[in-house]
Image (cartoon, grey):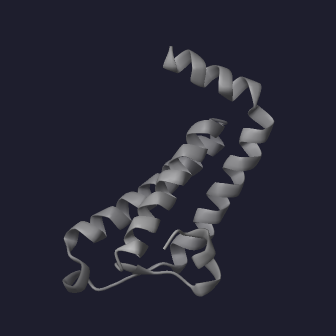
């Protein structure tokens, strides 16, 4: 049921999903290089692993976008954002002030 529903969403809203996915992937692609992770001794290995996971989800989102899997691209970009948002809230990363409005912290 879930797979059929996901396929239906991809087919019904392909144009709008594409636009939203492209926007979010672009946004995360712009932000990731600007993120400053605090020193490992200050944040611990776990925070560094979560940051690497965020970068991995960004790569996944680019792959999905390239393959025309817009819902998956959007989901992966949002997961990347969620990891960054959590790291920012916990004080493990710094993000330029111009981008802070995109985060809950």
Whether residue 71 sits left or right of residue 90 in the image: it is right
The picture places residue 70, in percent across and down from the top left corner, at 65, 39
Whether residue 101 sits left or right of residue 47 in the image: it is right
The picture places residue 87, in percent across and down from the top left corner, at 38, 70
Whether residue 80 sits left or right of residue 86 in the image: it is right
Above or below residue 73? Residue 28 is below
Q: Residue at x 29, y 70 (%)?
A: 48
The picture places residue 88, in percent across and down from the top left corner, at 42, 74
Q: Quadrant of residue 9?
A: top right
* Total numbered circles: 0
- Does the image show residue 59? no
Which residue is at the front of the view, 88 or 31?
88
Q: Residue furthest right?
A: 15
Q: Residue at x 36, y 80 (%)?
A: 91
Which residue is at the front of the view, 83 or 40?
83
Which residue is at the front of the view, 15 or 101?
101
Which residue is at the front of the view, 93 or 58?
93
Q: Residue at x 55, y 69 (%)?
A: 103
Above or below residue 7? Residue 30 is below
């Amino acid at each position: 049921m879930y797979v059929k529903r996901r396929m239906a969403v991809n087919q019904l809203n392909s144009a709008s999903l594409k636009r939203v996915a492209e926007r979010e992937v672009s946004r995360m692609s712009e932000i990731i290089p600007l993120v400053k992770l605090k020193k490992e001794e200050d944040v611990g290995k776990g925070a560094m692993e979560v940051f690497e996971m965020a970068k991995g989800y960004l790569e996944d989102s680019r792959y999905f976008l390239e393959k025309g899997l817009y819902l998956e691209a959007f989901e992966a970009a949002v997961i990347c954002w969620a990891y960054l948002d959590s790291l920012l809230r916990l004080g493990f990363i710094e993000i330029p002030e111009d981008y802070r409005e995109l985060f809950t912290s």
